[in-house]
Image (cartoon, rainbow, N blue to C red):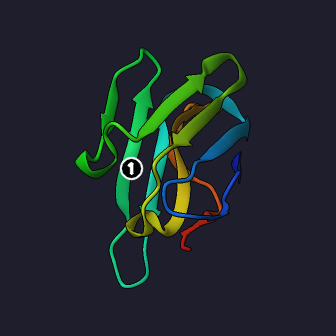
Amino acid sequence: QVQLVESGGGLVQPGGSLRLSCAASGSIFAIYTMGWYRQAPGRQRELVAARTSDGYINSVDSVKGRFTISRDNAKNTVFLQMNSLKPEDTAVYYCYADVRTNRGSRDDCWGQGTQVTVSS
């Protein structure tokens, strides 16, 4: 079993910054892709940014130039530095990991979500 624990959400004013962290633990042999999705009220969950173990990054156009994803592969941790936040960034942010477990299965794993609210 794999657990993803997120931290770093909160309330911030427009133009402010937040840094999200997510640490994976448990029966992990390898993590291929690790990243962040978000879901705003009444909307579908969408990819924010994801990074593969060899450094390839995919992100949604609306966050390019403002959000930066990074990983510490040795610690099974992913970070999302969010700058120049806008009210439309308000959502629950979910950590995601594509994991090969020690038992050999390949699982999509999700964190519990952390709320990010951008408001004055």
Res 11 → quadrant = bottom right
Q: Position of residue 113 (x, y in %)?
A: 61, 63
Three-letter code, disc 1: Val
* Tag 1 residue: 48
Q: Nearer the viewer, residue 14 or 111?
A: 14
As helix, strand or loop, the secondary structure at mark 1 comes to strand
Q: Position of residue 110 (x, y in %)?
A: 57, 54
Residue occupying the point 35% across, 28% down = 57
Count of picture labels? 1
Crowding near the residue tagged with mark 1, few <14, some 14–19, many ≥20 C-alpha atoms within 10 Å = many
Residue at far right of view: 26
Residue at far bottom of view: 42
In the shown orientation, is residue 94 left or right of residue 6? left
Q: Is residue 3 above or below residue 81?
A: below
Q: Is residue 50 above or below residue 108?
A: above
Q: Position of residue 50 (x, y in %)?
A: 41, 37
The quadrant of the image that shows the C terminus is bottom right
Q: Nearer the viewer, residue 12 or 43?
A: 12
Q: Position of residue 82 (x, y in %)?
A: 51, 45
Residue occupying the point 54% across, 40% down = 80
Residue occupying the point 45% across, 61% down = 38
